[in-house]
Image: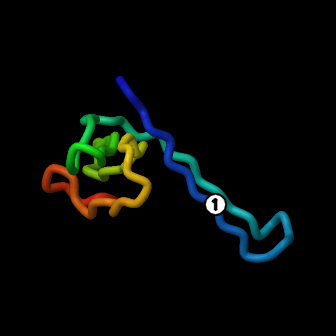
């Protein structure tokens, strides 16, 4: 089983009492490589909640567009 750690942090001002953070572990249900063309591809993962994340750019092109969808799933 694969897991992805999703975290967030916010700070309202500089006092310790006003800081917050959250860390959540989510199960990965699908992962793979999405090829845009011969020179552009991305490694991606889909969580148990249906969120699709790009994990890594694996192409050779220096300039590229991050896809808004992978396999009909919105990239978040």
Q: Position of residue 55 (x, y in %)?
A: 41, 44
- The residue lying toward the viewer, choosing from 37 and 43, is 37
In the image, residue 69 sits, relative to residue 27, either above or below, namely below
Q: Quadrant of the C terminus?
A: bottom left
Residue drawn 36% across and 43% down?
59
**Quarter of image, res 8:** bottom right
Helix, strand or loop for disc 1: strand
Q: Position of residue 44 (x, y in %)?
A: 32, 43
Q: Taking 9 as reference, is 75 left or right?
A: left
Closer to the camera, 43 or 8?
Answer: 43
Q: Which residue is mark 1?
A: 9
Quadrant of the rendering where the N terminus is positioned: top left
**Residue at x 55% of width, y 51% of height:** 7
Residue 57 location in percent, x, y? 40, 45
Residue 52 on image: x %, y %: 30, 51
Which residue is at 22% across, 50% downward?
A: 36
| Residue 15 visible | yes
Asked if residue 47 can be seen in this view, the reply is no
Q: Is residue 59 left or right of residue 13?
A: left
Side of 48 where 16 appears, left or right: right
């Amino acid at each position: 089983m694969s897991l992805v750690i999703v975290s967030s942090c916010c700070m309202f001002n500089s006092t310790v009492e006003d800081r917050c953070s959250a860390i959540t572990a989510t199960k990965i249900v699908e992962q793979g490589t999405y090829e845009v063309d011969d020179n552009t591809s991305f490694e991606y993962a889909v969580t148990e909640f249906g969120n699709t994340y790009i994990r890594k750019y694996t192409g050779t092109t220096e300039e590229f567009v991050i896809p808004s969808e992978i396999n009909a799933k919105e990239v978040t």
